[in-house]
Image (cartoon, grey):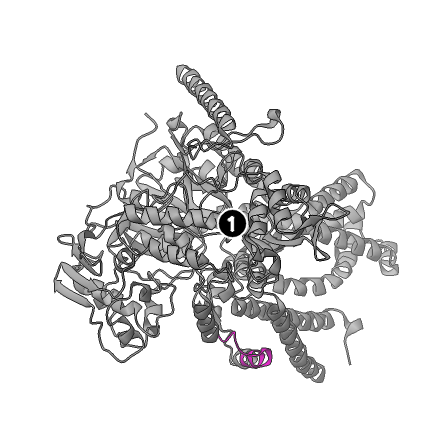
Amino acid sequence: MNGYFIKRILYLIPTLIGASVLIFLLYSLVPGDFVDTDPNLTAERKAELKELYGLDQPLVTRYITWLGNLFQGDLGYSMQFQRPVTEVLGNYIWSSFFVALASLIITWLVAIIIGVISATRQYSLFDSIITVLVFAAMATPSFFLGLILIKIFAVDLGWLPAGGMITTGSNYTGWEYIFDIGEHMLLPVLVLTMLSVGGLTRYFRTNMLEVVKQDFVRTARAKGLKEKAVIYKHAFRNAMLPAITLFAFELPALFGGAIITEQIFNYPGIGAIYMQAFTVRDYPLLMGFTMFIALLTVISNLIADIFYGIADPRVRLK
Amino acid sequence: MIKKYASLFMFSIFSLFLLAACNETDKASGSDEERNENESASEAGNSENTIQAIKDQKLSAENPELAPQASTNRGDTVVVTLQEPGGIFTPYFNSSGYDGNVQSVMFPPLVDVNEKGEPIPGLAESWEISDDELTFTFHLRDHLKFDDGSPLTAEDVAFTLTLLHDPSYAGGTDITEAAIVGGLDYKEGDATDISGIKIIDEKTIQITTEKVNARSLRLLGSQVLKKDYYGNGYKKGNLDYIRDLHLAPIGAGPFRYVKYLPGQEIRYEANEHYYGGKPEISTFIYKTTKGDSQQFFQTGEVDYTTLTANADSLELLKSLGFANIDLYTSTAYSYIAFNHNNPIFAQPEVRQALNYGLDRETILNVHYQGLAQAANVPVAPISWAYTDKIAGFPYDPEKAKKLLEAAGWVEGKDGIREKDGEKLTIYYYATSGGVADTLIPIAQENYREIGVDFQVELMDFNALLARVEKGDHDLASFSTPMQTDPYNGVQSFHSKDTSSIVSGYKNEKVDELIEATIATNDIEERKKAFHELYLELEKDPPLILFGYSKVLAGTNARVEGFNPNGFRGISPSLPHLKIVDVKR
């Protein structure tokens, strides 16, 4: 197990270097850079600024400089904010994280409950209605869903704020502050949950259906266990096994932000900043953030493999 | 009820007036009769589908008592929307224009401008320009103070001007344009101060320049940085320390900076040291948004916002009842740039033909539903330099055809003109999502009619700029930023100008005339110079002038005093904001 673990960690290094090459090349191939965004600059001033930002260097030199800084934990300097990339990410990433976390917890709870009930009552009225509903939610574009919810709950009914993270101009502290943020998070979390709950529900339903047909479930029933015990103890646990992988994959998504949803709800998250950085070609911020997500992805992969091994002796590697 | 009928009545009168205006311009089309800037409505397509030009106007809220509870609960805190700034709140150092908005609340200039773009006193009570127009003497107001209570003196003004000459200054202001005596010795040489800047006493500063330039007054009379704050630890050649002050500005405006919550808001409080007296409202907030802000206005979360200028948004504001509406013309103009390095455009006739052959009024009317107008000169109609005596290029396909014939482009078999075996195919680049979406189908039809094959490629703004700089385009759509001086609208036509969008245009007479527009401080003389230049530009058009856009602003009726204009936006209004009780 230990040898395997070390091997997996060593594999991470080439994977990350590969990812860094890809990320760097993709961004540097996009036409235009930060200095080009300002049409008012004269050619001389542009050349001066490009030199200042190092944009006049050849690609390979820029890559090596970037990678070198990366190894020292330096993601560079955001051009549009004139602050270190890590500081900008820090400013926005946590607000995205809390929304994603809330949505993740709710999504999983709802999906597990609905998935299991749907599976145990396959083709029932409940199953059909839920299937239609989750598919409808899944198929609706997030911007449309977001705007409809704003229209209904914020503009027409006036129950919830139309966007933002806190009430503008408020000076709340303590519980009041948390309540205020919670109120503002409600709609974005609802949208994100509605979008992702569909896929996950189907996933659990299928898993559950498969497991219920297995021999050990029949054995459990045959030895006279109550149906509840059969489903929730024997079948459910086994159906949840593949979910470990799935859950670990959610780790990068927690920090990834939700570009469209954040935009619509005017939420100060990393997704919206990412989009803004792209429109002004703030490459250090874009590359730094993408690299961060790449790192989280490979780590979550590793975690998934390890947990899977712990949970399921059948796949434990020797 | 009576009120409602009254407004209905007013509205019908208004429509009648517009119809009349419209008929009049129809009759007058083609002649040189005086045209009112706002009456240039034309019939778009068939008569059933007529879109009327809507004038700049102010409309008072009909039902102020409908103001949402969320807004009235806020008391004397006023919230205004702003696009997310970059977080650089030191004047002269920002790259985003939205940072400029944040700064203008705290940093009034020495010389301000009024709603026509004419200079008016700001921090400076008055100023004198010597007879040779080279020496400027600014007299500061009495008892000026920064918002921390310390005095603002001529020393601070001198420091600001010196700082802008620092060799390591990396911002967007080019102070050398003002050509202060000794300025270059400081910037490029080893001088320790600038000889042309002379502090006469605490309240008076005299600046001598080498060259007459009408723009110097505002360049020199700009915002003031506090010397013992922004200059604390300043050594010539190193301005890195200022980065740490970007998020802690000290100014002298009506409001004092309190804090910035990235992605959310910028908060200010009333400044009791402001020369105009402490403002009535206690807190001013810029709420930052990422685009649409209509829902925040509707729910009362913001008191003032600007919306996409079209008739739908105007209707929406009217339907709310509690919105005071301001519709005003912006100082920017939009245009379609030629690639002057392409031999097709070498003949002015071809460029004129492409101007005449494009039905700009229809495009603008369809897109903005009457809240825009076709441009005739490269300056907005609200500027003192504007003239309606110059026709621009009203839509005239017949004239366009004749011009193309004259330039040697004759119609080929498929209806597309040819010359020396080459087809007249033109590639147009634009960003998607804006007016280009409306322009493309209409322009394709327009140009087809005069025998031009119009090809289109859409891309995002940065890609557009990068490709235009490379010279890949034939035509490309752009809009100017806000223009405080009419010179901004023409400077890129000068052959020595190195900005990338209008490159390769060369006309000696135009060069001379452009120089003449800033060669005096006398507005009447400058006016003449501009009009002469505009006439000359018609003979050799550097671009296709497109349209003047409007700004549609809504104010919650609970706040009085917003009086925005195209030159300074809302900043002149801020000291005068007042809360009124709408729930009587």
Apparent side of residue B320 relative to residue B162 in the rendered image (left or right): right
Residue at the (42%, 48%) spot, across then down: B534
Q: Quadrant of the N terminus of chain B?
A: top left
Total marks drawn? 1
- Residue A152 at x, y percent in the picture: 56, 36
Position of residue B181 relative to residue A170, above or below, is: below
Please report the bounds of the magenta region as a residue range. Answer: A54-65
Q: Secondary structure at mark 1?
A: strand
Is residue B421 rendered magenta in the image? Answer: no
Label 1 Cα crowd, 10 Å radius (few <14 / some 14-19 / many 20+): many
Who is closer to the viewer here, B75 or B289?
Answer: B289
Position of residue B21 relative to residue B404, above or below, is: above
Apparent side of residue B373 relative to residue A8 in the rendered image (left or right): left
Note whether residue B270 is visible. yes
Residue under circle 1?
A: B335
Position of residue B500 relative to residue B268, above or below, is: below
Who is closer to the viewer here, B490 or B323?
Answer: B490
The amino acid type found where label 1 is placed reads: Tyr
